[in-house]
Image: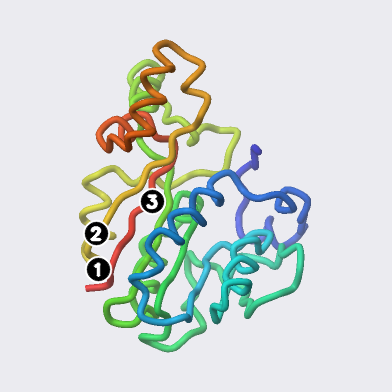
Amino acid sequence: MRLPYKTTDELRAKIDTSPYVELCYGLPFGIETFEKYESILTGKKVLDCGIGGGHFIRHLLEKGYNAYGLDITDMRVKKIGNFAEVDANVDKLPYPNDFFDAVTAWCLLAHLENPHHFIREIYRVLKPGGIFFNEMPNTSLHARKLFFLTGELERFTEDNDHISVFTPAIYKKTILKYFNELAVEYWVDPKIYKNRLGWLKRIAVKKNWLKFKKFFGAEVIQILRKK
């Protein structure tokens, strides 16, 4: 799914929910990762940021969570959960300090004009020791080769709405200023199995070789704890 970059006013002027009827690109990986680590949560109050069609909110409610969600405008397929219309670039999140046990952002930071304001707000509304699940495009080996050859980053081209890049240094200076990294998970697109040495790549993924997945993964999720 390719979505052009639009400003807040453009997004709110014409609401099109059709792209959000189906699960977004990285959400199945997000659900899988959340379930893998949900045992470390100390409570059931969870905020999903950039909820789109509301699929993850529905998943949380079905599992008995007290689910909240926010987005730039209401694009939920079903009007469920506690929803707030928020511009994460500039708005203060409409929740008290130390309110949530966990916050999720499935590939949201890459879309924001001011992700650093949002990071500080997530830190504010999380309880001490609360968990932040942050998904972003991974700077894979393919992405690095593309940048070397063309000067462009994979999935940050003119025909999509990704605009904010987090290099390892930016990640350390901004996100890790407020959070401790507990774990990192990578999602590898099965398309790589169709290329050269696909059988070997399949073995590496099945055995969960982290270094391999770091180089070939399309998505990365950082599991972070508030300092």
Residue 217, quarter of the rendered image: top left
Type of the residue with mark 3: Ile
User: Is 206 on the left or on the right of 57, as rendered?
Assistant: left
Q: Residues within 10 Å of mark 2 (few under 14, many from 20)?
A: some
- As displayed, is residue 176 above or below residue 19? below
The percent position of residue 136, horizontal first and vertical second, equals 42, 48
The percent position of residue 153, horizontal first and vertical second, equals 42, 30
The percent position of residue 44, horizontal first and vertical second, equals 47, 80
Type of the residue with mark 1: Tyr
Q: Mark 2 — residue?
A: 181
Q: Secondary structure at mark 1?
A: helix
Depth check, front residue: 29 or 72: 29
Instruction: Identify the residue at horizontal 78%, vertical 51% (top origin).
Output: 18
Picture disc at residue 178: 1
Q: In front: mark 1 or mark 2?
A: 2
* Quarter placement of the C terminus: bottom left
